[in-house]
Amino acid sequence: MQSNSTSAHFLSSHEDVLMKKILQTHEPDDYHVDSAPLLHLAENIIHNITMPCVVKSGTKSVQEDPNGRQDTGIVRSIKQLGQTIHLISREMLRYSSMDRSLHATTMAVLELLGKHSWSTKLVIVLAAVATSFGDFWLITQLYPTNPLALSIASMKGLRNKIEVTKSLEQKLKAFRYLVEKMVSVTKCMVEFEMLPMQYTTLDYDAMAAMKTQIHIASYWVIRSSVACTSQITSLIVLSFEQVHTSTITATWELWSSARKVSDMDNFLKKQFNIFHQQIENKINSGLSHLFEEVHLDNQKVLSTLFALKDDYPLRDYRSEEKVGVVVLRNKEVILFISTLTIKLEKLLLIIQQLQNHPQNESEKPFVIVWVPIVFSIPWSDAEERAFKKMANIMPWYSLYEPSKLSLSVTKFIQEMWHFQGDPIMVVLDTKGKVTSLNAMDMISIWGPKAYPFSVSREQELWEEQNWTIEFLLDDIDPLISYWMQDGRIICLYGSNNIGWVQDLTSQIKDITRAGILLELIYVGSSYDEDTRDILSTIIKEKLSSYLPQTTISIFWLRLESILSSKLRLGNTDKSDFIMNEVKSLLSFESSKKGWLLISKGSSTEILKLYGNKVLELLSLFQVWGHKVRKWGFMGAIRKALDPPSVIDHCNYYSITPYTEDLNEKISLCKKCKCPMEKNFMYQCKINT
């Protein structure tokens, strides 16, 4: 085989004949096999063989998945290919035990792998080599300290030949280098087969040269794998003297194969990079017009964003299987775009809000796809582990291999969708049109009620929204929701001053002992350390009810989302009551003085008190408490707060349509601010 300095178009007569024989073995079916996880496992085995691995007493054990689970991709690959790997391993071992040439064994292996893609053929062969070498290496390393390894070594006749490995350093070095190059070739072929060729017309001659090199490289990787397996077998079946004598010849053969495979690897990588760049350029130019076009469905848009040749770019969170964008057809798609480091409380808030959807999973008109973005290329092993950990807890679809996300798409997300690192939720309708560049706030506030998550829907929801304690808490705690439905007086408070908290809770207990039914709930602040200390004291001294630490963080994140939503919609008017109230609360969160909100049930009347004024008012309960029977608790407090009225007599009235809960509501006079007396008016409907 010629090196990469010569065009792959011009094969020698020998190579031309070889090419025809190789292609005659290739009869692929349409069955998709995801071999990448298996290749990664084989690579790990080979990598660990290069490390010192003698087990000693007290040695730190290998880390396992805390949940005791294997990577689902590896499990699936082994289920699909395990029997074939065993069959190929046996076939390659036959070369050492039969009078058959290396070429004949290579062709026999190719015949057995005929139905698989070129990259899958090589993954299977490398898995067989890794398994054989791994078995041998484990025995040689564990033999001195492990009784089981000692017995197996004796059974294989290795016990008296273990020391031979000390004289095989150069041979093992050549072996490892060759296998590393074979892995590199295979990885390049896997990535090449994943290229979304549909986005560009590649140069015919360059593509022909690439395919030729792939076919020849496949032959030589398999041939080298057979040779490697033979070298492993020779350490077991040959005598001590034979092993020692054959070392020089074997080392030369391994280095020779390594150089040949290395040349092929260099050529394949060079061509792959050229093709990859052409496709990136095509995707980049197409993205700018993609969202301006009218589509019949969302398939073209999603296929371009998640472009892969195998059409299975997504991970199903239920089955953990690879799936295609076809599962998103006729659905509104929310792209949850983030880095790998997401604030847990923010994620829990979104999950909690969306779990309240009344429909079954299959009936939901929308789906969420997690699109993790990493700014460093390529991804590190730590980032891959972080992704898998997050993907396992995400109750949504996610990219199966986000590290393969097109650089053009990543750049588009950053520049056109303004992703800078904080999570965003871009909404695409059923035709792939962007209806919201960030629905994060409206989902945090209203959950599924915000469907279809458009800007117009967000504005509509704000027009309908009242400022109530019920809206503030939003079913954040089932017990508090019950208290509100029961018509109890709800008091929310926060402070980072434990002395103020103790004074407040003591005075509230005095009021409840007087027969006033109210619930005092600590909601802290977004400053975790201060809140954690106060919360610990509240729990220990049983001062009041409280929200758990995580729920407190969610409460404040919702407030931030409310303000963010208002500002993003352009609400800067000082008359926007809800926005001003939220601003006020957010300014309280770091206060050492403390604050208190008081409301009854789902009433739109909320009293807001701050600092020492709260303690002064409550300390005077004996003075104004007798007014509770006439005016109610809220009215009595308002009477105590407002200066004496200079109006001797007030004739203000208003007519309100009857509702079932009208008798429970207390209306305040807009003129003198006193509670209004209820009367009934009957009107004949004949003329209405």
Image (cartoon, grey):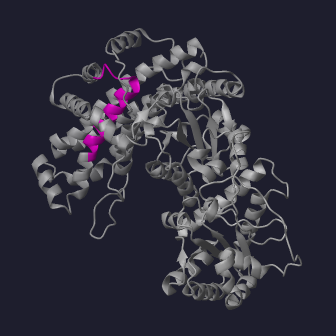
Position of the N terminus, as image quadrant, is top left
Residue 594: quarter of image? bottom right
Q: Is residue 108 left or right of residue 275?
A: left
Where is residue 508 drawn, in percent x and y? Answer: 60, 84
Number of marks in the image? 0
Q: Residue placed at 27% from the left, 49% from the top?
A: 137
Residue at x 54% of width, y 31% of height: 331
Coordinates of residue 612 in the picture (x, y in percent): 74, 85
Residue 686, image quadrant: top right
When the figure is inspected, residue 491 is found, relative to residue 395, above or below; the finding is below
User: Where is 290 relative to 130, above or below?
Assistant: above
Residue 453 can be seen, yes or no: yes
- Looking at the image, residue 146 lies above or below residue 408: below
| Predominant SS of the magenta segment | helix
Between 481 and 373, which is closer to the camera in this rendering? 481
Relative depth, front residue between 175 and 152: 152
- Does 126 lie within the magenta span? yes
Asked whether, in this view, residue 68 is left or right of residue 10, the answer is left
Segment tinted magenta in the rendering: 113-134
Residue 563 drawn at (x, y percent) = 73, 57
Question: Is residue 595 visible in the rendered structure shown here?
Answer: no
Who's the residue at 72% across and 28% down the image? 288
351 and 383: which one is in front? 351
Judge whether residue 368 is colored magenta. no
Pick the front one: 192 or 503: 503
Quarter-wise, where is residue 299 in the image? Answer: top right
Residue 278 x %, y %: 63, 24
The quadrant in which the C terminus is found is top right
Taking 359 as reference, is 105 left or right? Answer: left
Check the image and name the residue furthest to the right.
646
